Image (spheres, grey):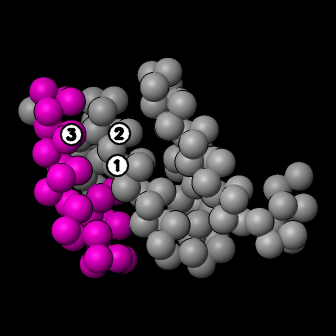
Amino acid sequence: KGEEVDSAGLTQERLRAVVQLGKLEVFEGTPPDRLYEAVDLARAAGALVEQAWAQENLAIALIIQGDPDAGAKILDDAIAQQPVLRHRESMVRWQGKGVAGG
């Protein structure tokens, strides 16, 4: 089914759906597997903005779920690839410290 969606030029819509499903995983307290999938999907499609968006969501998810080091690594990788995200870095780290109790 994914191949059909991608071949129809709907990669962005598929990516958005995967990110939204990933957010549900975070709220349910389960590992953010869909957010990892979203990062991989965006990377494979060469969609840099969407990849950065997925990485930002993944970083927040990991921080919220108690793994701030993994979240920081994802965020650092995203910023290295997309320097425009640097202005959001402090906000994401601040939110993570508040949620993770750091």
Task: Name the foreground residue: 51 vs 10.
Answer: 10
The answer to whether 42 is drawn above or below residue 62 in the figure is below
Numbered mark located on residue 62 in the image: 2
Of badges 2 and 3, the one in the foreground is 3
Q: Secondary structure at mark 3?
A: helix
Q: Do callouts 1 and 3 mark residues in contact (Cβ within 8 Å)?
A: yes
Magenta stretch: includes residue 93: yes
In the rendered image, which quarter is residue 76 located in?
bottom left
In magenta, the rendered stretch is: 74-101
Spatial CA span between label 1 and label 3:
9 Å
Identify residue type, mark 1. Ala
Does the magenta stretch mainly form a helix, a strand or a loop? helix
Q: Residue at point 9% right, 33% down?
A: 102
Identify residue type, mark 3. Gly
Magenta stretch: includes residue 88: yes
The answer to whether 102 is drawn above or below residue 82 in the figure is above
**Is residue 93 visible in this depiction of the protein?**
yes
Name the residue beneath numbered marker 3: 96
